[in-house]
Image: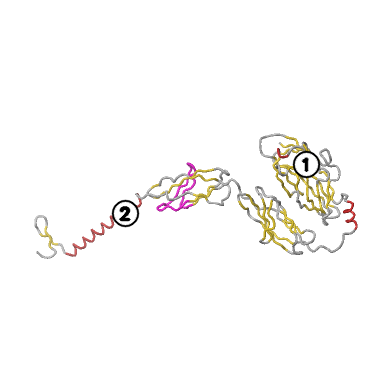
Amino acid sequence: MSSGEAFSADGQPILISFMEYQRKKIQRNNLSKIFAFVLLFIMATFFSSVDLWASTLSQVSGEVCGQITVRWGKVEGAEEYELYRGDELIYRGKNNEYIDSGLVLGRSYPYRLRASNRAGKSPFSPTVHLVARNLCTPDKPDNLFVHSYPCGGKTLVHWDSVPRAERYELRRGGTVIYSGDLTYFFDSNLRFNWRYSYTVRAWNSSGWGKEVSISGRSSDRCPPFVPDKPFADRAESGTEGDMSISLRTAPRDGVRVRTSADVISFNVTANHSDMTIRRIDVFFDKDPRRYMDKVEIKLGTRVVASIPVNSETVSVISRDEYRLRLGDLFLEVKDGRTTALTVRVTRKPGPNYSQYVKVYLKNNSIRVEDTLFISYTLPTAGGGITGDFSRRFIVN
């Protein structure tokens, strides 16, 4: 029998060349490999599972109020993710983070996650309860300005009050020079006629708001002369006359305070000198702690001071008299100018009620200073609950 000769079942020889035998053998091996590869592909595509349990939902810190940023780890084998808030599908995609917005402040929300690929969807992860921040960071302060004080290397930095702000931080250059709840700062001991940059930002327990910056010049050197006799006469006599005050016709009696409203306003006129209002005492015949949330002072149309109404800010003078003092003010009225000084109140939130309240000034309720830092008080006459500086309003 020659090499390469084969026999059939009945003993008849079948001649197959050695090369053809090898070729068919290789074909059979290749078909086996292809079949194995296809089988593995099918198993990987249609029978693989996604291990979601290794991924944990978490909340990102420092986010915007009313939002929850949900984050999770990458899951091996996942092609996309589905995030649910309760039973509602709120996200489907490939990212590992989602910002859920428009939420109620302080409310807890349930979240759960599952992954998917062409084989199907995994079981849900355990539910995680995340809380939307209950306090927004303050807005940036508006109307920041720097005023050069009359003389002596000084500036006045002022800004508008910011809702929800608990305190402010003022920096000159990179140095913090003020931190507190006032909306102005009197900066002194500066170089004469020198430009300084200031930055202010507001803070509450949710964090710092955006900052705003401005620059301005300090005042020049004070002239080295002794005040002339008219100034000395006014200082020695102590008579009122450098600032006058009168009640404005608007707002009239009977203003309704449903949220906030101006309740009394005065015309103040500076005479012979620029005048600075340093303190205002506002009086009420009803306890303002029961009906009011805050009191603001406006100079012209701009709110320049604000104070909350509480047990620390209200002094009980008698059963029918309560005083709210706004001190450490720095409200400047230019010589010869007349400006409106207005008291604005904000109603305390709560159930509906109606209460008549008298607001008024007593004699010497307002303390002012001229450019030589000589103090005066006004009004000198006509003050009191039945006097010339009172109005009646309704908290409704």
Disc 2 residue crowd, few under 14, some 14–19, many 20+, Cα 10 Å: few
Q: Is residue 84 magenta?
A: yes
Q: Is residue 275 above or below residue 360?
A: below
Identify the image quadrant of residue 107: top right
Q: Nearer the viewer, mark 1 or mark 2?
A: 1
Amino acid type at circle 1 is Phe
Amino acid type at circle 2 is Leu
Q: How many marks?
A: 2
**Residue 345 position in % (x across, y down):** 73, 42
Taking the spot 34% from the left edge, 52% from the top edge, the residue there is 44
Disc 1 residue crowd, few under 14, some 14–19, many 20+, Cα 10 Å: many
Magenta span: 72-96
Identify the image quadrant of residue 231: bottom right
Local secondary structure at mark 2: helix
**Residue 391 position in % (x across, y down):** 79, 39
Q: Which mark is residue 40?
A: 2
Q: Is residue 262 magenta?
A: no
- Name the N-terminal-most of marks 1 and 2: 2
Distance between mark 1 and mark 2 Cα atoms: 87 Å
**Residue 40 position in % (x across, y down):** 31, 54
Nearest the viewer among 306 and 89 is 306
Taking the spot 36% from the left edge, 50% from the top edge, the residue there is 48
